[in-house]
Image: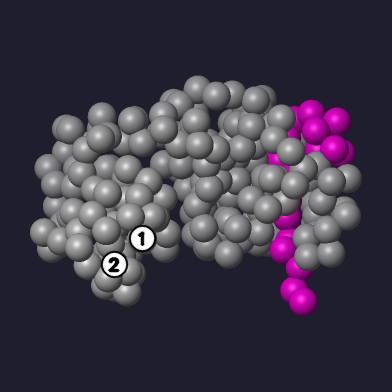
Amino acid sequence: MDKIKVMIVDDHAIVREGLSSILAFEDDIEVVGEAVNGVDAIEAFQKLNPHLVLMDLQMPGMDGVQSIKKIKQINPEVKIIILTVFQDEEYVYEGIKAGARGYLLKDTSPDELVETIRKVNRGESLIEPFLATKVLDKFSELAKHEKPEHNLTPRELQIITLLSEGKSNKELAQDLYISEKTVKTHITHIFEKLNVRDRTEAVMRALKKGIIQI
């Protein structure tokens, strides 16, 4: 089994050591290196080529958002999870806009941290629920000033709107009087048209493009 190679970026040694200790117990995760700031992170990333980066936001010199942008330029496929003490939606938005696929607070449980690493590595996007609401509000506000551009059908528009409300496939089928199989087909088409891989990313992309509003 190939291990998930993780790099930790944080300017506090105690945080880096704590995260390394937690992840050391996982058979499918390996911490391949650490960095103390954004500049150091870029240099280390080029040497270590990890699959996933745990990134602090506020660091001396180059901050986390700038570092995320540069790392994604080097390797667009790398997965990045922001791990921070800040709950400011502006930080959340900027981090996701830069390319992060997950956002967790530093007081999250070890189990949740590990599970998030696994899910994001598989290609999912994960944000803590109360932060996700703020991010969606931010994208919705921005969407009001953008001209909608899409090729979604009326039915697909209905479905992406309901997805933004957190509806399950079963609930979508009941609301639209169609089968769950048909719902899944429509969602697959939505993912293809918006060039996304999961529901969270689809809703965010739709909001950003002004396709839907909350």
What crowding class fits label 2: few (fewer than 14 Cα within 10 Å), some (14-19), or many (20 or more)?
many
Mark 2 or mark 1, which is nearer to you?
1
Q: What residue is shown with label 1?
A: 170
Element type at marker 2? helix
- In reply to whether residue 11 is colored magenta, the answer given is yes
Q: Amino acid at mark 1?
A: Lys
Residue 116 % position (x, y)? 64, 51
- The quarter of the rendered structure image containing the N terminus is bottom right
In the rendered view, does 199 fall on the left or right side of 12? left
Give the magenta range. 1-18
Name the residue at 16% across, 38% down: 146
Separation of residues labelled 2 and 1 (CA atoms): 8 Å
Establish if 198 lies above or below 62.
Answer: below
The image quarter in which residue 213 lies: top left
Name the residue at 41% across, 50% down: 200
Q: What residue is shown with label 2?
A: 183
* Number of the label disc, if any, that sits on residue 93: none
Q: Amino acid at mark 2?
A: Val
Establish if 161 lies above or below 17.
Answer: below
In this view, the residue in front, 113 or 65, is 113
Residue 187 % position (x, y)? 31, 65
Name the residue at 74% across, 38% down: 109
The image quarter in which residue 183 lies: bottom left
Which of the two labelled residues, at mark 2 and mark 1, occupies the earlier sequence position?
1
Element type at marker 1? helix
Residue 12 % position (x, y)? 79, 29
